[in-house]
Structure formats: C-alpha cells, structure tokens
Amino acid sequence: MRSILPTPATFAAVAFACAGVATPALAQDGPDDNAPARSAEGTVFDGDWVQVGIGAGFAPDYDGSDDYEVFPLPIIQGSLGGIDINPRAAGFALDFIPDSADSKVNFGFGPAVRLRTSRTGDIEDPVVAAAGELDTAVEVGPSASIGVSGVLNPYDSLSANLDVRWDVAGAHEGMVINPGITYFTPVSRGAGISLSLSAEHGDEAFNEYYYSVTPAQATASGLPVYDAGSGFNKLSANLLVGVDLDGDLANGGLALFAIGGYSRMIGDAEKSPFVALRGDADQFLIGGGIGYTF
C-alpha cells in the first residue's frame, strides 16, 4: 500500500464535493422541496468552511498496470478567507478569485501542486520492477477554471478546468496538462451525483520518463526498447455519488461518498511495453469513504 495517492485518487477527492462543491448553487433561494434548502441562517458554504475525510480506493498499481491495490484517500478542501482549496490527485489547487453567491458564472485561477509517485516503489509486476523504480515528481503550475450554475435546474453546476504543471524535483523534468469537465447536480435534499470527464497530455520528457523503455531498462527487464513521444496518454470518465447523513447537503456535517471510474490509456502510452505487454489499457477504479464539513 502506498503512502502517496495514485493518480485515480483525484476523482475520489472530487467525490467528497458531492456534499458541497456546488456551493453557489446550494446557496440560492428556491422552492423546490427535493433540492437542498437554504435556512434563514444560510448554508455552511456561505462563509469559511472546511471539509475533511478519509476513505479507501481500489485502483491500478500504476498508470497502465493490470495489478490492482487498495490505497487510502485522505481528503481536505474548503474555502478560507476567500481562497478556495480544491483537491487534486496527491495534491491541491488554490483559487484566488472570490465567487459571488448570486452569480451564475464563476471563474477560478491559482497554483496547483501534485506529487506523482507512479512506479516509485512496491511494484507488483516483477518484470516492470526489474526495469527499475522511478523518482517522485513534484509538479507545480497554474490552474484555471470556469463554472456555470443553474444549467438544467436551479441547483446544478457545470465546470471546466485546466491544470498545467511542470516537474520541479528533477524526476520527469517535463510538463503535463490536465483538462477536465464536471457536471454536478443534487438529486434530493441529501444526495448529489457528479460526472467527470478528463484527459492527460504529456510532453516528450514526461511520456519518455513514464512510458519509454530505455536500452538499460530493456536489458534489466527483458522488455523491448521503446521510445514514447509527446501526446495525450489517458482519457477518463468517473461517476461520483455523495449522501449527507442528516439529509441536508447545505448544512454540512457527515456525508458518505462512493465512486466508480474508467480510464483508457491511449497514444504512445497505450503502445508502451509497460502497458501493452505487462499491463492493460483499460483501467478501473472503485472507492468510498466518509467526510465531515464544518
């Protein structure tokens, strides 16, 4: 079991937000008896708020692996002093642009940080392990987003985000781009669902580091030499469900979440011997946990 979250954890992180990520929408007044209600005191999301939680997931050992493992899902997100803290896979993104509760369109911009630990240890496949462990990458860069509330009902939201990060720790020494789009809607006062679509693009340095097989690695593992170029390497779709335990999404407290996801390795990553010969281009994720908002 890893001490650092693997890549699929980003979607489970978002799952906690089913209890509160659509804060502008949940803060709106409305007569719908099946939607989250706004009390005379407002909602827990009207000012500063924090959400913490813990869960567990079951996902591939590394991107493209056909070995699966259980891993922990610690989560923290919130809004403090007008700065939003948004979860990322093994990291976070900050949003320095304040949102207006009565605005249908909101923008976000700030830094994103992520630790990438793919194939850094505990590799189950002996052939892949023989190719050698990789170093942990520390990726830093800007994150931008736009969200629209009240798309199909007064309480839903549609958001798009783009993270661009560079490794500053001397691991892959490249750049990775993650575009994504998410639709969230409450289905009752106490439950919400979220559908997320995302992709990953690596430059030549990134894809070479994770998907190429060097002559030295080929000698050590028996895998054929392979040179991966830049391009998109993964497409993902994930369905998230959150249920507030007291039946009201808007007042915080305890909430449960569950997640199911599918990713498809594509491009040079799909053709990599680490995937094509020793792994699987089809990647699955299941997980769940509990969070508390205050």
Image (cartoon, rainbow, N blue to C red):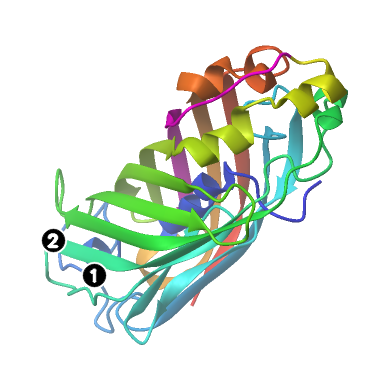
At 68% from the left and 48% from the top, the residue drawn is 117
On the image, the x and y values in percent for residue 236 come to 44, 31
Front-most of 32 and 124? 124
Q: Secondary structure at mark 2?
A: strand
**Residue 230 in magenta stretch:** yes
On the image, the x and y values in percent for residue 234 come to 47, 29
As displayed, is residue 222 above or below residue 83? above
- The residue pinned by badge 2 equals 105
Front-most of 42 and 217? 217
As drawn, the residue found furthest toward the bottom would be 81
> Is residue 154 among what the camera can see?
yes
As displayed, is residue 82 above or below residue 264? below
As displayed, is residue 216 above or below residue 1? above
On the image, the x and y values in percent for residue 43 come to 32, 75
Report which quarter residue 98 is drawn in. Answer: bottom left
> Is residue 20 among what the camera can see?
no
- The residue pinned by badge 1 equals 27
**Residue 109 in magenta stretch:** no
At 27% from the left and 79% from the top, the residue drawn is 42
Question: What amino acid type is highlighted by mark number 2?
Answer: Val
- Image label count: 2
On the image, the x and y values in percent for residue 75 come to 58, 62
The crowd level at tag 2 (other Cα within 10 Å; few <14, some 14-19, many 20+) is some
Q: Which residues are magenta?
A: 224-244
Q: Secondary structure at mark 1?
A: loop
The crowd level at tag 1 (other Cα within 10 Å; few <14, some 14-19, many 20+) is many
At 79% from the left and 28% from the top, the residue drawn is 216
As displayed, is residue 4 above or below residue 6? below
Question: What amino acid type is highlighted by mark number 1?
Answer: Ala
Q: Taken as a whole, is the magenta stretch helix, strand or loop?
A: strand
Foreground mark, 1 or 2, reads 2
